[in-house]
Amino acid sequence: MAREDAAVPQEGAAQRKSEVNKRLGEWLEATLPRFFAWLAVTVWRLGGDWRGLRPFLMRTSAHAAVVAVACVALALSSVRWPALAARPLPSAPEIFAQQTTPEASEEALAEVLVSNSWPLQPGSWGPVVRRADPHTAIPHRPRLDVITYTVQLGDTVQAIATRFELEPTTIMWANPAVEDAPDLLRIGQEITILPIDGVYHTVAEGDTLGSIAEKYKVEVEAITSCEYNPLEPPGFVIEPGMRLIVPGGEKPYVPRVVTSYTGP
């Protein structure tokens, strides 16, 4: 029964469209011959002075062409007739009642809103979700302590220093084995990485802060003010075996001595 009821309005709309087309055709058949006959008679009557009639003929011809084009376009137009266009669109609740999935409901609702010229606002019909941003800026965080790095395949002193934003000399001065042979890194070798550039000094018997600062050409305050050193004010007591970072320090150059046997 529902299908039969739906077919009745469609048949009625088709009949109304047919009647409108029939009446339009009858009107065109009755009007166009009269119009062109009037135009021909007018031109014949005023045919004596063609120069004076030229503006009139141009205006009349233009109007006639516009009327003819409008009539033909109206007759052949595929625009929905008022009887069909006036049918009400389904409401949002009706659409939702016919849907079975959330995705289908959202698509149907969007179709209704677009058909009624309602603006679509993202997020108006669902929970607010934070959009993912793959380009999140990660702030640079300085290292807060001395770390140990394991040498990988292809590593060099320069590459390791660049990776940790240090000078190559800092890597060598913190690792005596690397300082002795910087070009002979072994895979799996563990090396010490300082958080800042400088020298990593092991306190020996008889060392003082003054002697250490003098050795590496820095001020005593550079050592005591370094937050990475385990020194407590006001005495800043140091003990043998303690490891101290000397910020900005430079190790004295020690020339390498090579001995060779020249006996008989």
Image (spheres, rainbow, N blue to C red):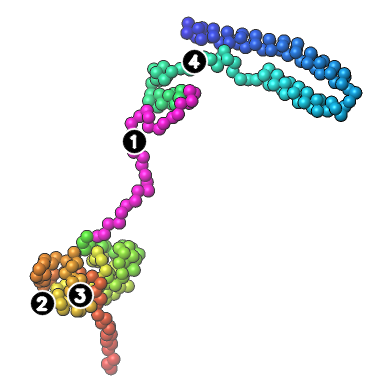
Amino acid residing under circle 2: Glu
- Label 4 or label 1, whichever lies nearer to me, is 4
Please give the range of residues in magenta.
114-143
Q: Earlier in the sequence, mark 4 or mark 2?
A: 4
**Residue marked by disc 3:** 219
Q: Earlier in the sequence, mark 1 or mark 2?
A: 1
**Residue 110 lies in what quarter of the image?**
top left
The residue closer to the viewer here, 257 or 15, is 15
Q: In 3D space, how far apart are the residues under numbered discs 4 and 2 (Cα atoms)?
A: 98 Å
Amino acid residing under circle 3: Glu
**Residue 253 lies in what quarter of the image?**
bottom left
The residue closer to the viewer here, 6 or 227, is 227
**Residue marked by disc 1:** 129
- Residue in view at x 26 percent, y 62 percent: 150
Q: Are marks 3 and 4 in contact (CB under 8 Å)?
A: no
Q: In 3D space, how far apart are the residues under numbered discs 1 and 3 (Cα atoms)?
A: 56 Å
- Label 4 or label 2, whichever lies nearer to me, is 4
168 in magenta: no
- Residue 55 coordinates in the image, percent (x, y): 80, 28
Near mark 3 (Cα within 10 A), the count class, few <14, some 14-19 or many ≥20, is some
Near mark 2 (Cα within 10 A), the count class, few <14, some 14-19 or many ≥20, is few
Q: Residue pushed farthest bottom?
A: 264
Q: In 3D space, how far apart are the residues under numbered discs 1 and 2 (Cα atoms)?
A: 64 Å
**Residue marked by disc 2:** 205
